[in-house]
Image: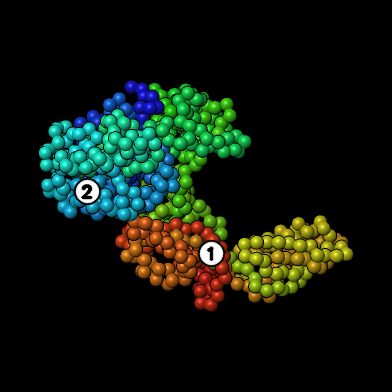
């Protein structure tokens, strides 16, 4: 069955871990006729949590594409992880979908991950709905959850469904738009059936319907004027108004239910079909054209085909899968497109949609749809494919910088290359996981969003390849510099039969402003050193700066001037002057009061107010300089600080411990700063020990 763009809905299901996202989706697929029986997360058989790692840990760790056809509408769902370690999967889902459904636990209200997700949606002006889940649990309160949302986000949710009872008395929901009651099925594998609204809920229904009229009036000035004049709207006007107001993110529709009881699902599906935005309803995508100009491209089935690769998955059975969001035209097998990243032409092979791990071949993917291109060796996440005469590139995903780093090596050194190959594959699948070889510290360093993410990647590699790895805290990339002016001369002289080697240089060195790097000036007068030897002299300076005299770290922020020298008519050469320059620089540096520099990081920490004191005290103990704290709503405080990188190597683990897993942070490099005393002594000792160990290995 084919669908037009207007018949497509794309919905990201997100929320704090443990709020029941996968369970709700499983029952949506059941109610929508995709599966004959809904499974539980505990059974390991749900459609969207199909990875061995997800089944073992009973959590989602990757976004999973599923869909159902409901009332002639194709609804694509991206089920996302709840842990902050896998936030990259949520971000790609928010980018691909026109709206999001955030789950909130009826017992606890809004939790920290939901607050961060809400802020992300705000930054995109993305429409969202909330599903108040677990209404059948003890301490569940629909009204308290709504009040919590209102207090934390300064926006009052609009109930589209209301519960009939709460906790042990929960007996189903009322669809306020369509004036129907859905009694909780006797078993979770039975479908909801519509019935009359019980008399005891008539008043609650009428009050909720008034709220819906008010929300619908937000959709347009005309509806607002009519509502203010007449006090009500027709059913069609209400649906039209809700659809417009939601597309503009002016309202947040709210639903009640219990996913594990298959309750609250039908009214949710009805609303998604009637009022959730289709791909044409939202603002155009920003793109960069062939001339580097930024233009806007709207979702349009009439234009030539173009799509963005939102996700890469490497499956041991299906091979390389490129998940795409089609923006214009339609993708069809055998279509010739260009990968804009490298201008490489490519002919599309088979196209698919998915029900979790099960691929379903399709004849086409129309504008607005989300699907899969199989076995394309060249496509990577963030690529744009286009059939336009003048291709353009869609903006890449805005992903956070990895914060948790570890040095890694294979326990069996013969497996080092294979381990690196598997790590790079994992980095292709998840762009918040990075792999780099640090030539300075001679370590392979992996970086991710947290300990859980990295551990699961390494566990998967070990499970599939039997390669065991060992990790350790990575070495910090210190620097060296000077603090005063100095001069030195050095003569390189060597005679061993035939042509010898001779070069003499006199240097002045002085410190530069932090971050300036390196400057060189030729102050030689009278031709004491020929210009032809200057490149060799600069090479010698660069060689000397690769390893300073304090602890062997690279030297930065130094200006070097050659002021005099001497050459020999026969024995002087570029090599001789390079060696002379290297010696002169080192000698001058020793006299210029050299010091160590350590990297300082800009750190932003997000914590609940109750943890604020502990976290700030801990940052002070890490030699951090706190520059501010800013309440950002929802009981969350943002702390801004500058902290030495050496003090943050275990911060992901320590912050999780301090905040019971609710805290998170972002980090980026700021500048280098001098260190002295015991801290510097310890760094020097560690550097010497490393050199000794390295020499012994050789």
Secondary structure of the residue carrying tag 1 is strand
Between circles 1 and 2, the one closer to the viewer is 2
**Residue 574 drawn above or below residue 3:** below
Mark yes or no: residue 644 visible: yes
Q: Which mark is residue 142?
A: 2
Secondary structure of the residue carrying tag 2 is helix
Mark yes or no: residue 347 visible: no
Q: Position of residue 473 (x, y in %)?
A: 44, 62
Q: Position of residue 646 (x, y in %)?
A: 48, 66
Specify the farthest residue to the right: 526
Q: Which of pointers 1 and 2 lies earlier in the amino acid sequence?
A: 2
Q: CA distance from mark 1 to mark 2?
A: 49 Å
Q: Which residue appears at 14% of the width and 41% of the height? A: 201
Q: Position of residue 251 (x, y in %)?
A: 34, 42
Q: Please give left or right for residue 71 compared with residue 185 in the image.
A: right
**Residue 354 drawn above or below residue 440:** above
Looking at the figure, which quarter contains the C terminus? bottom right
Q: Mark 1 sits on what residue?
A: 599
**Residue 434 drawn above or below residue 333:** below
Residue closest to the eye, 264 or 226: 226
Q: Which residue appears at 60% of the width and 67% of the height? A: 480
Q: Position of residue 504 (x, y in %)?
A: 79, 67
């Amino acid at each position: 069955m084919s669908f037009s763009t207007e018949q497509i809905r794309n919905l990201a299901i997100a929320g704090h871990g443990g709020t029941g996202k996968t369970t709700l989706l499983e029952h949506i697929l059941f109610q929508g006729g995709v599966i004959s029986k809904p499974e539980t997360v505990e059974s390991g058989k749900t459609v969207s949590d199909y990875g061995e790692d997800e089944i073992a840990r009973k959590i989602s760790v990757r976004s999973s594409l599923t869909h159902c056809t409901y009332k002639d509408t194709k609804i694509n769902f991206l089920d996302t992880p709840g842990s902050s370690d896998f936030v990259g999967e949520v971000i790609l889902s928010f980018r691909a979908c026109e709206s999001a459904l955030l789950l909130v636990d009826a017992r606890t209200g809004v939790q920290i991950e939901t607050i961060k997700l809400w802020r992300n949606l705000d930054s995109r002006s993305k429409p969202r709905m909330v599903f108040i889940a677990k209404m059948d649990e003890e301490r569940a309160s629909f009204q308290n959850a709504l009040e919590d949302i209102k207090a934390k986000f300064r926006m009052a949710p609009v109930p589209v469904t209301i519960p009939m009872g709460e906790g042990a008395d929960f007996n189903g929901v009322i669809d306020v738009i369509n004036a129907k009651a859905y009694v909780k099925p006797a078993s979770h594998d039975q479908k909801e059936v519509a019935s009359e609204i019980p008399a005891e809920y008539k008043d609650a229904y009428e009050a909720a319907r008034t709220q819906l009229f008010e929300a619908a009036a937000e959709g347009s000035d005309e509806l607002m004027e009519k509502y203010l004049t007449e006090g009500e709207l027709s059913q069609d006007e209400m649906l039209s108004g809700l659809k417009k107001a939601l597309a503009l993110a002016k309202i947040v529709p709210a639903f009640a239910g219990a996913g594990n009881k298959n309750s609250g699902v039908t009214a949710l599906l009805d609303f998604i079909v009637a009022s959730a935005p289709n791909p044409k309803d939202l603002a155009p995508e920003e793109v960069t054209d062939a001339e580097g100009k930024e233009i806007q491209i709207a979702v349009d089935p009439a234009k030539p085909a173009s799509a963005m690769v939102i996700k890469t998955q490497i499956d041991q059975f299906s091979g390389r899968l490129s998940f795409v969001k089609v923006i214009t035209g339609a993708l069809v097998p055998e279509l010739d497109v260009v990968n804009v990243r490298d201008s490489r032409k490519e002919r599309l092979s088979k196209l698919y949609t998915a029900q979790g791990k099960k691929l379903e071949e399709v004849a086409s993917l129309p504008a607005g749809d989300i699907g899969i291109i199989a076995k394309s060796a060249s496509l990577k996440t963030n690529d744009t494919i286009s059939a336009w005469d003048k291709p353009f590139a869609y903006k890449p995903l805005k992903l956070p910088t990895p914060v948790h780093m570890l040095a890694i090596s294979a326990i069996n050194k013969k497996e080092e290359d294979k381990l690196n190959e598997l790590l790079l594959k994992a980095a292709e699948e998840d762009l918040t996981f990075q792999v780099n070889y640090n030539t300075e510290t001679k370590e392979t360093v992996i970086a991710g969003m947290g300990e859980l993410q990295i551990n699961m990647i390494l566990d998967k590699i070990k499970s599939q390849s039997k390669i065991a790895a060992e990790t350790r805290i990575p070495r910090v990339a210190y620097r060296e510099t000077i603090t005063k002016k100095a001069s030195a001369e050095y003569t390189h002289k060597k005679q061993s039969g035939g042509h010898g080697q001779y070069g003499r240089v006199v240097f002045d060195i002085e410190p530069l402003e932090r971050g300036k790097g390196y400057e060189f000036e030729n102050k030689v007068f009278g031709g004491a050193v020929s210009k032809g030897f200057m490149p060799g002299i600069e090479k010698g300076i660069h060689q000397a700066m690769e390893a300073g005299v304090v602890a062997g770290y690279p030297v930065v922020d130094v200006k070097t001037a050659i002021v005099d020298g001497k050459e020999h008519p026969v024995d002087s050469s570029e090599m001789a002057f390079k060696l002379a320059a290297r010696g002169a620089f080192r000698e001058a540096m020793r006299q210029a009061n050299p010091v160590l520099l350590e990297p300082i990081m800009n750190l932003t920490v997000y914590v609940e107010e109750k943890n604020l004191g502990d976290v700030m005290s801990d940052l002070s103990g890490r030699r951090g300089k706190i520059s501010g704290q800013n309440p950002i709503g929802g009981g969350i405080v943002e702390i801004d600080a500058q902290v030495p990188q050496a003090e943050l190597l275990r911060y992901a683990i320590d912050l999780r411990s301090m905040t019971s897993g609710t805290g998170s942070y972002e980090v980026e490099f700021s500048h280098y700063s001098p260190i002295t005393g015991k801290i510097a002594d310890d760094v020097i000792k560690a550097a010497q020990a490393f050199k000794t160990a390295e020499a012994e290995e050789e």
